[in-house]
Image: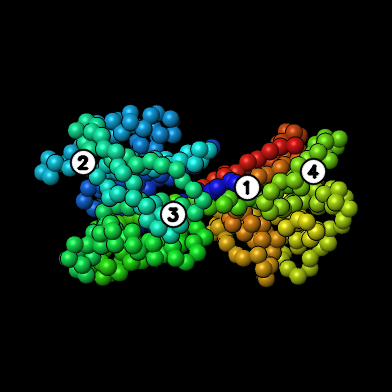
Amino acid sequence: MDLFYDVYETSLKKTGEELCGDKVKILKEAGKTLIVLSDGLGSGVKANILATLTTEILMTMLHNEIPLEETLRTILGTLPTCQVRNLAYATFTVVTIDERNMTFRVMNVDNPPFFHIRNNRLLKHEAQTTAILGKQVTAYEGPIEKGDFLGIMSDGVLYAGLGETLNYGWGWENIGAFLENVFQKPIGCASDAVRPVMTQTERLYGGKVGDDATFVGTLARESSVLNIFTGPPVDKKSQDFYIRQFLDETGRKVICGGTTANLVARALGRTVETRNTETSREVPPPGSLEGIDLVTEGIITLSRTLELIKKDAPRPEHDGKGMNAAVLLAAEMMQADHIRFLVGQSVNPYYQNPLLPKNVSIRTNLVGMIAAELRQYRKSVEVNLC
């Protein structure tokens, strides 16, 4: 079973400040999810710069596979210390998830402890504490399972309500109990757990946030896969092979292109029907083919879909009411975690750009641009040419 590690973060900036002094950076690579949260000392512009510097250095080193301990040693040796309070100018938490082995590790320097929810209950992990350059670093590690939730935060969440609605702030135990209560209802994505925590944080501050507050949640859930077949394979002898490969994939299936749709329909012994319920001057109407979730025209629809995901990343439901083919296709993409493109290299001369070499199609370029946009939304994207 493939798991997807859904990450969602949100922040509240201190009342009266233009910038938040917390910074989050998230990176998804093959088989790995990396999360860095840094809390800059103080608030406002100075704190934001320090937190940004910290997250950038940490993530760059982790991305280049420099060992975590060496990375921490570098960042602790780089960050200046406040001479008045003898505190580092930025605190931070690093989460690394090994997706292949389904394990996680949390390294924490002066931020509040993390949360681990499993089966609606808060788990408590024994911390391993080491000293690096005189700074205490706490580490937690263990297996991660389907349905598990990991949460990390800045101390603006921990001390929400301090001196206002609560004498000692919200507190780790109380936040843990709050999360347990949130998980009594079905949780479909990480935001379902993160948003209630931040709503309660703001409420405890009485609407006047006393410190930058950030909460980041990761939910391990079953991956939602989308397969998109667009364009006929360049080698006609291999068409049957690629059609079968597409049909045998798990997940939802979309075909973009009339010729491609007819090839698949012929292999299935069926016909493509045109749906005339959606009208649009921008894109041709979608079609329907039994066994395929969505059938659209090719180049025009892909072009319009690229514009949509650049503009506002729509997330409509699959009811098809008032939606043209591009909106439906954009919705399929935005609701998926992992998108596989199978792009045929047979060039349609009608759409071919005369400025491009004959072996480079507009379709291939469009898919490349769509893939780049989708990766900005932390989606896993494969592009396979045929």
Which residue is drawn at the image coordinates 67% and 71% (left, top)? 321
Identify the disc placed on residue 244.
Answer: 4
Provide the residue designation for mark 2: 88
The picture quadrant where one finds residue 294 is bottom right
Question: Which amino acid is tagged 3?
Answer: Arg
> Residue at horizontal 86%, vertical 35%?
237
Give the residue type that dot 2 points to. Answer: Ala
Q: Residue at x 29, y 62 (%)?
A: 174
Q: Position of residue 276 (x, y in %)?
A: 79, 68
Kindly identify the residue that appears in the image at 74 percent across and 51 percent down: 256
Nearest the viewer among 121 and 63 is 121
Mark 4 burial class by Cα count in 10 Å: few <14, some 14-19, many 20+: few
The label nearer to you, 4 versus 2, is: 4
Mark 4 or 3, nearer chain start: 3
Q: Earlier in the sequence, mark 1 or mark 3?
A: 3
Q: Which residue is mark 1?
A: 339
**Residue 152 versus residue 274 in the image, above or below:** above
- Quarter of the rendering occupied by the C terminus: top right
Residue mark closest to the camera, 1 vs 3? 3
Label 1 vs label 3: CA separation?
28 Å
